[in-house]
Amino acid sequence: MLASISKVAKQFLEKTENKKIQVISHNDTDGITSASIITRALQRMNKEFSLRIVKQLDSEVFKEIPEDKVVLFLDLASNSFQYIKDLKNPVFILDHHEIISKIPENVIIINPHLFHEEEISGAGLAYLFAKELSDENIDLAYLAAIGMVGDMLEKNLGKIYTNILKDSKVIIKKGLTLYPATRPIDKVLEYSSDIYIPNVSGSASGVNAFLRDIGIQRVNNKYKNLIELNPEELSKLITAISLQSTNIKDSSEIIGNIYLVNFFNKVEDIRQISAMINACSRLGESRTAIAFCLQNKKAKAKAENIYAQYRQSIVNALGSLPNLRKIEQKNYIIIHAENKIKDTIIGTIASILSNSRTYEEGKAIIAMAYNENKIKVSARVVGKNGKNIREILNSVIEEVGGEVGGHKFAAGCLVEKENEQKFLDMLQKKLEIEMVKI
Ligand SMILES: [Mn+2]
């Protein structure tokens, strides 16, 4: 694969000799870090380019591509050849999503699925490509590490990624996977949304009592950071969490690798950086996310602000749950937030609920919120077991009209507000038929 990337980088330089470049990337952490790497690499070569960050590739995106530009797709496009084949532009793709149709002639693509070597995230590919453009881009390797963690590809590292991590100077530590591991343990326990410990989560005094009971002391009036705990303290903490948490069954669920990177001259937990990038991008601030990735100080302050607001809006949304309109049956619950939860976070709320073990395995959770004259619908299945929720949404939308996306256990759709009642009636009907089948 590396030899092919080198060849493609040369072709890219030839094709863009006298031409402007249009970069199009995905709006998740991996896509944003990919775009950041390419942005810096093209700036270093004084190339003229424009950048677009999109949630998905649809016909709208393709309408706006100027004919005279070389197009570079990052972290997407492998399943959009039906649109790409009609472009007159030279097209380059660096992507790791599955290829589902024949590669068109105007396309030069690097996709790990074509090589069967190892899985590489979009940012990993962008980094390897950038390094072929110029050796000085080796200082962007940390972004490839962030993209990898953002796409949760850190479980099975192959040879290529191991080398990228070497370039990035990322430190890997085994430990408790609550994050950020670079913050004091009391704060992490108080605010963590990954674990739930009754009377501890969300309560500063509860956290103090919990830590006192297991014998973890303050040093100079402050608790240690998670990564500073000694092995004995760490093991006590892990045992206590797995015993008292209501959503952790086994301590292995909370033990894993922690990736630490030097970012803005401080050691930071990559999962934290990834969560911040994600929050910015979700709230429509992809420019801030990219500047933050490239370690712009102003962007950091802004990103921190956005992230704090994002977390607060999730806390508020969870707090508003008891007062929302609900339709609940044994095997499903429909939660209609109307205007009380923003459509940009309704999917996150549905995910938190499906992971919270509040509901039985196999139960379908459907959360809805208004978005102007439309309704955003997010559906999850608890424990990723049971019905195919995407098929159910599909069958409803076929009759009501709208757009569906996602997969078996996590899907969503967009419905016209005027079809609200029709959608709700049809959805309940389909969910009930599906229940009888199981
Ligand atoms: Mn990706």
Image (tube, rainbow, N blue to C red):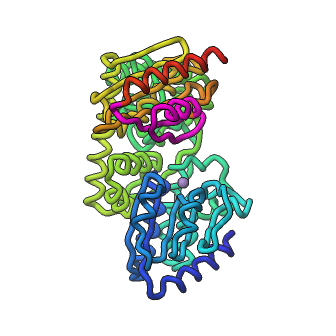
- Please, which residue is most extreme toward the top here? 330
Total numbered badges shown on the rendered structure: 0
Tell me residue 407's x, y (percent). 58, 39
Tell me residue 228's x, y (percent). 46, 41
Q: Quadrant of ligand 1?
A: bottom right
Seen at 35% across and 21% down, the residue is 321
Residue range corresponding to the magenta coloring: 391-418
Q: Does the segment drawn in magenta span residue 247? A: no
Tell me residue 428's x, y (percent). 49, 19
- Which quadrant holds the N terminus? bottom right
Seen at 33% across and 60% down, the residue is 287
Front-lying residue, 226 or 81: 81
Residue 234 position (above or below residue 294): above
Q: Locate residue 167: give its quadrant.
A: bottom right
Q: Is residue 163 visible?
A: yes
Residue 88 position (above or below residue 378): below
Seen at 50% across and 26% down, the residue is 354
152 left or right of 335?
right
Residue 191 position (above or below residue 260): above
Q: Does the segment drawn in magenta span residue 398? A: yes
23 left or right of 117?
left
- Which quadrant holds the C terminus? top right
